Image (spheres, helix red, strand yellow):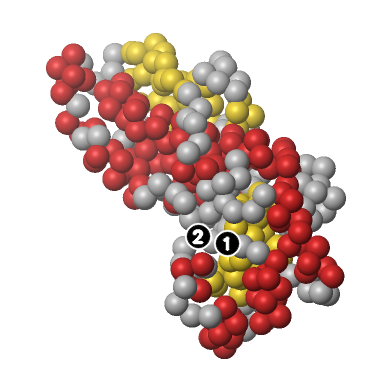
Amino acid sequence: MPSRRTPSTGFDALARRALAEDRASRDRTTRFVLDRPAVAEGRVVAQGSGVLSGVGAARAVARAQGLVVTSALRDGSRVRPGTVVLRLRGDVRRILSAERTLLNFLMHASGVATETRRAVDAARGARRPLEVWATRKTLPGLRDLEKAAVVHGGGRPHRRDLSDAVLIKNNHLAVVPLAEAVVRARARARAGERVQVEVRSRTEAVAAARAGADALLLDNLSPRGARAVVRSLERAGLRRGRWVELSGGITPDRVAAYRSVGADAVSLGGITHSAPALPFHLVLVSPTA
């Protein structure tokens, strides 16, 4: 089975980079309008329904700005319009300068978690458990945030990076024949490490399994085509103990169509790179001198 390594939860460096990108320390409007310190509470409020994620990154933004998070819901919580997901306290000028960065993390991560939950819900009822996995199709610099959000939505992170697992893809096979590629990978893989091969037909799937692949990635196949591949593996006595993953153009709306295929997992790039943001806004409460 491919890697299940848990994504990193250390977001301090990411928060600092994001604040620097927005030049939070040079917020001219706030400097011009507020010329002295004033303590206030900021409340982050959901404006839509979905699954919360990005609280770790939001906390990191608050730390970087010298703000205190006084309460926060847990990542993975269900939210709806009006839900207060986080409260922070400190200098109102620092809250205002951090507002957009903090909300950006929450909106994007919660969008990923919400899309993942949609896919997980659609996968229920399969004849064998069908897991929802992420891919490496992530926005540059935001991989750990997005992979963590997938977990918060009930999915699996899959490979974090190229060092995390062995997956022989179509472009590898354009250079090295399938059986030879599997033999080479098997000879160099760590003890107990699985070797996965991307295949696009029954012939390729059976050949990869016979060559020693532990896991197969069925790429860009229709539900009928994927089911035909699984049946071919079953008839050849090659299905038992072998991980079968589906990928390629599958959206949360299409997951249900693949439930009867007989695969172990479905991986969706869209839940990370194209998830609609879940909206939040920040409300300031009772500034004091």
Q: Does residue 265 appear left or right of residue 278 in this picture?
A: right
Q: How many labels does the image show?
A: 2
Quadrant where the C terminus is found in the figure: top left
Of helix, strand and loop, which one carries label 1?
Answer: loop
Q: Can you give x and y, in whole percent of width and height, for residue 73 in the image?
A: 58, 31
Task: Please tell me whether mark 1 or mark 2 is closer to you in this view.
Answer: 2
Which quadrant would residue 208 be assigned to in this image? bottom right
Q: Which amino acid does label 1 sit on?
A: Arg
Q: Does residue 97 appear left or right of residue 70 in this picture?
A: left
Q: Does residue 256 appear left or right of residue 38 in this picture?
A: right
Q: Which amino acid does label 2 sit on?
A: Arg
Q: Say whether marks 1 and 2 touch (CB < 8 Å).
A: yes
In the displayed structure, 157 sits above or below 76; it is below
Which quadrant would residue 95 be assigned to in this image? top left
Residue with the mark numbered 2: 160
In the displayed structure, 221 sits above or below 53; it is below
Residue with the mark numbered 1: 5
| Residue at the spot 34% in from the left edge and 28% down from the top edge | 100
Front position in the image: 173 or 165: 173
In the displayed structure, 253 sits above or below 6; it is above
| Residue at the spot 56% in from the left edge and 15% down from the top edge | 82
